[in-house]
């Protein structure tokens, strides 16, 4: 499955949602997660993310391996998202900031 990585936190542009053919995204307060059971590995979402936050599960940046399990857990807590919505007003300022995992809200 594809996985949403750390740089989505506090960016949450939701462009990814527009292209997913199987509605595999689930929405938290400041992050989206992909359900690995629903994802069909089409790869369409990866280039759509303005934050370059989506990766194949075996191609995550070093240190982000834990996002595989994190995505799988968070989708159980959060509602499905099928429509693009406006990003947070300060999304661009957070794009690329290091160590954002501490800011993840559940
Ligand atoms: Fe959806 Fe395809 Fe991205 Fe999986 S890889 S989350 S199926 S767009
Ligand atoms: Fe997050 Fe990128 Fe989607 S920032 S909400 S994974 S478009």
Image: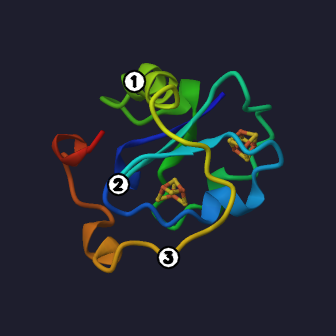
Drawn side of residue 103 relative to residue 47, left or right: left
Question: Who's the residue at 75% across and 51% down the image?
Answer: 20
Q: Earlier in the sequence, mark 2 or mark 3?
A: 2
Find the residue positioned furthest to the bottom: 89
Q: Residues within 10 Å of mark 2 (few under 14, many from 20)?
A: some
Residue 83 screen position, x and y as percent: 67, 63
Residue closer to the observer: 100 or 25 = 25
Image quarter hosting the C terminus: top left
Q: Residue at x 41, y 36 (%)?
A: 61
Gap in angstroms between the C-alphas marked 1 and 2: 20 Å
**Residue 39: image location, x then y, percent:** 73, 32
| Residue at the spot 61% in from the left edge and 44% down from the top edge | 80
Of labels 1 and 2, earlier in sequence is 2
User: What element does badge 3 sit on?
Assistant: loop
> What residue lies at 30% left-to-right and 62% top-to-bottom?
96
Callout 2: SS: loop
Residue at label 3? 86
In front: 1, or 30? 30
Q: In terms of sequence position, does the residue under pointer 3 or pointer 1 come before the other?
A: 1
In the image, 4: left or right of 11? Answer: right
Labels 2 and 3 touching (C-beta < 8 A) = no
Mark 2, residue position? 30
For disc 1, the marked residue is 65
Q: Which mark is residue 79?
A: none
Between label 3 and label 1, give the one nearer the viewer.
3
Q: Position of residue 55 (x, y in %)?
A: 56, 40
């Amino acid at each position: 499955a594809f996985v949403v990585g750390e740089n989505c936190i506090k960016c949450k542009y939701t462009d990814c949602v527009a292209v997913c053919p199987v509605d595999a995204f689930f929405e938290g307060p400041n992050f989206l997660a992909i359900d690995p059971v629903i994802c069909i590995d089409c790869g369409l979402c990866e280039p759509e993310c303005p934050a370059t936050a989506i990766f194949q599960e075996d191609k995550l940046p070093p240190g982000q391996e834990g996002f595989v399990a994190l995505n799988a857990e968070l989708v159980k807590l959060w509602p499905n998202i099928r429509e693009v919505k406006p990003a947070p007003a300060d999304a661009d300022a957070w794009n690329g900031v290091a160590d954002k995992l501490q800011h993840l809200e559940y």
